[in-house]
Amino acid sequence: MNRKQLSAMFDHTLLKPDATEQAIIKLCEEASAYEFATVCVNPCWVKLAADQLQANDVGVTTVIGFPLGASSSAIKAMETKQAIRDGATEIDMVINVGYLKSRFLSAVKSDIEAVVAAAANQAIVKVILETSLLTDEEIAEACRLSVQAGAQFVKTSTGFSTGGATTAHIQLMRSIVGPQIGVKASGGIRDYETAMAMIEAGASRIGASSSIAIVEKLDAGEGSY
């Protein structure tokens, strides 16, 4: 795997609440230079990011119902529609964890379906499971519901909860969704070795704020894959 191939697997991420306009502009400049798949920003910065990236192929990911997943389906759908109007090309929505743990499975599925419908094939939908809060059985159920609801990806974590991605969870998610659905590893991926372990476990996308350091290690010949 060369740097361009690796870079194309990254959502270059800045979701800190104190992120400034200049920080978002810098993020976009970095994503352009390194040819990352997308930048991942909070909804208020989508239009700025889209404007910054309009001259190249880097997409704009934003987060919906973030970070708790506990807002109503109607609000998540409205957020999604606004984000797409602002220029988002990918939508990372947080599952309703409380509903899942309560076994309100039809409500969980309907929640995802509301976002998929709002995206209306104009943006890729990724479903954040927040795996650190779930049992393996719940992760598997959430993956099945995500696929049934029409999402294109399942994703491990927000990065704002009790833990991030693990290779065991990536392997489990991949085993449930099969080869046609994307699996995004996010949360705590700060170095080349961890990123490669996630890819080997079945991740097809990586969400990280340390994207540059990771791909530069491959450039320096310190990593091999």
Image (tube, rainbow, N blue to C red):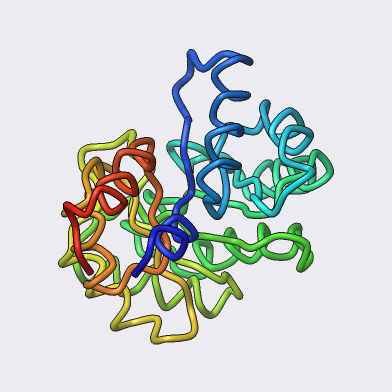
Residue 33 in percent (x, y) is at: 56, 41
Which image quadrant: the N terminus? bottom left
Which quadrant of the view contains residue 65?
top right
| Left or right: 116 in relation to 206 | right
Image quarter hosting the C terminus: bottom left
- The residue positioned 32% from the left and 44% from the top of the image is 216
Number of numbered discs overlaid on the protein picture: 0
Question: In which image quadrant can residue 76 be found?
Answer: top right
Q: Nearer the viewer, residue 3 or 176?
A: 3
Outermost residue, right side = 85
Choose between 1 and 54: the one closer to the eye: 1
Q: Nearer the viewer, residue 146 or 6?
A: 6
Q: Residue at x 44, y 23 (%)?
A: 16
Residue at left offset 56%, top offset 39%: 71
Is 160 on the left-hand or right-hand side of 63? left
Residue at the far front in the pictured view: 220
User: Image height check: is 27 above or below 171?
Assistant: above
Q: Position of residue 185 (x, y in %)?
A: 33, 57
Residue 119 lies, in percent from the top left, at 74, 59
Quick check: 192 above or below 19?
Answer: below
Residue 89 drawn at (x, y percent): 70, 53
